[in-house]
Image (cartoon, rainbow, N blue to C red):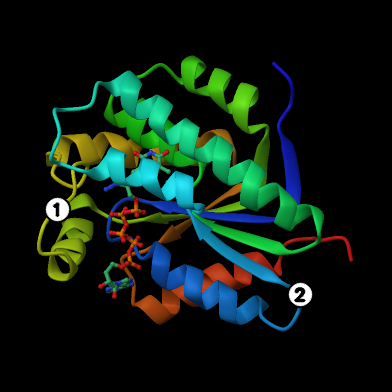
């Protein structure tokens, strides 16, 4: 398998539902603003076509998606997002901060749905080809994350409607990714107050060695 290209200004934020990814993304955008262009984006989504795929993925109104269908949908959205938004922005020297990226596929489709990591890696190397320089993994207990998300969303989407055991497997898979990639993945205890979590995230980004 060909190596993934790591871009020094590519940052991803990962974690379970309600972990505070959007909150941290806003703090990073503010911290980096003024330095150079900052592109904030998300997965699944980030382009009009990829957002349509996100809608299909999260819609509870159709028959249950087979695990392989889910996997191919997230990678179809990612292939479009990477080519249309992420690589062009990185090539022109912008920072790119993405709310979720390929680690989420290892966690949700791998840990959650039980798809073998080798099959996910084949898609990652075949159709994505890049990885972040830094991934901030916001780690939070499942019950706490669900309480936060429920306080915000009246109706759960198709994945949010899964049982706690699914989210426990997702959390364990994220932590396994962090253990396997210690130089890239920075684990942050997301159970603390939002401003403390955001300050940790900003410090981690400031410690990145980025060529001028
Ligand atoms: N998915 C997948 O299966 N495979 C893939 O490859 C990818 C994604 C890329 C949509 O993702 C779904 O896609 C997701 C995985 C799947 N399904 N699930 N579950 P998403 O990121 O759009 O959805 P989400 O995980 O449900 O995100 P979220 O609930 O919006 O979480 P968040 O962005 O991490 O949290 P937040 O909006 O910043 O905060 C949630 C609430 O908590 C909000 O009211 C905040 O004010 C509050 N908050 C935030 N931080 C704190 C702290 N520190 N203390 C107290 N309260 C806080």
Q: Is residue 72 above or below residue 159?
A: above
Asked whether residue 43 is in view, the answer is no
Secondary element at image label 2: loop
- The circle on residue 136 is none
Does residue 52 appear anywhere in the picture?
yes
Give me the residue at 36% from left, 64% from top: 190
Q: Quadrant of residue 181?
A: top right
Q: Residue at 21% across / 51% down in the picture?
A: 142
**Quadrant, the N terminus:** top right
Q: Position of residue 94 (x, y in %)?
A: 74, 64
| Label disc, if present, on residue 36 of the rendered structure | 2
Q: Residues within 10 Å of mark 2 (few under 14, many from 20)?
A: few
Q: Nearer the viewer, residue 121 or 206?
A: 121
Task: Where is residue 131? Give x, y as percent.
Answer: 65, 41
Q: Secondary structure at mark 1?
A: loop
From mark 1 to mark 2, how far is it between C-alphas? 37 Å
At 30% from the left and 39% from the top, the residue drawn is 57
Residue 175, quarter of the rendered image: top left
Foreground residue among 59 and 175: 59
Quarter of the picture for ligand 1? Answer: bottom left
Q: Earlier in the sequence, mark 1 or mark 2?
A: 2
Where is residue 147 shown, x and y percent of the image? 14, 63
- Decide if residue 6 is on the left or right side of residue 199: right
**For this view, does 58 lie left or right of residue 129?**
left
- The residue where tag 1 is placed is 156
Disc 1 vs disc 2: Cβ atoms closer than 8 Å?
no
Give the residue displayed 33% in from the left and 29% down from the top.
70
Q: On the picture, is 105 further left or further right than 58?
A: right
State the residue in front, 192 or 38: 38
Q: Quadrant of the C terminus?
A: bottom right
| Horizontal side of residue 116 vs 98, given as left or right | left
Q: Position of residue 166 (x, y in %)?
A: 20, 35
């Amino acid at each position: 398998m060909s190596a993934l290209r790591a871009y020094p200004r590519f940052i991803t934020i990962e974690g379970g539902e309600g972990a505070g990814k959007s909150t941290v993304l806003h703090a990073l955008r503010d911290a980096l603003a003024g330095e150079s262009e900052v592109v904030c984006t998300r997965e699944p989504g980030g382009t009009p076509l990829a957002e349509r795929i996100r809608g299909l993925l999260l819609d509870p109104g159709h028959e249950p998606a087979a695990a392989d269908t889910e996997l191919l949908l997230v990678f179809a959205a990612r292939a479009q997002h990477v080519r249309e938004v992420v690589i062009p922005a990185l090539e022109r020297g912008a920072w790119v901060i993405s709310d979720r990226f390929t680690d989420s596929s290892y966690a949700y489709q791998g840990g959650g749905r039980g798809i073998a990591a080798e099959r996910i890696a084949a898609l990652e190397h075949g159709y994505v080809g890049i990885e972040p320089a830094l991934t901030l993994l916001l780690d939070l207990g499942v019950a706490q994350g669900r309480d936060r998300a429920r306080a915000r969303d009246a109706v759960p989407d198709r994945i949010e409607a899964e049982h706690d055991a699914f989210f426990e497997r997702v959390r364990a898979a994220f932590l396994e990714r962090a253990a396997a990639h210690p130089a890239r993945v920075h684990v942050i205890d997301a159970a603390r107050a939002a401003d403390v979590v955001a300050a940790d995230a900003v410090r981690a980004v400031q410690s990145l060695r980025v060529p001028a």
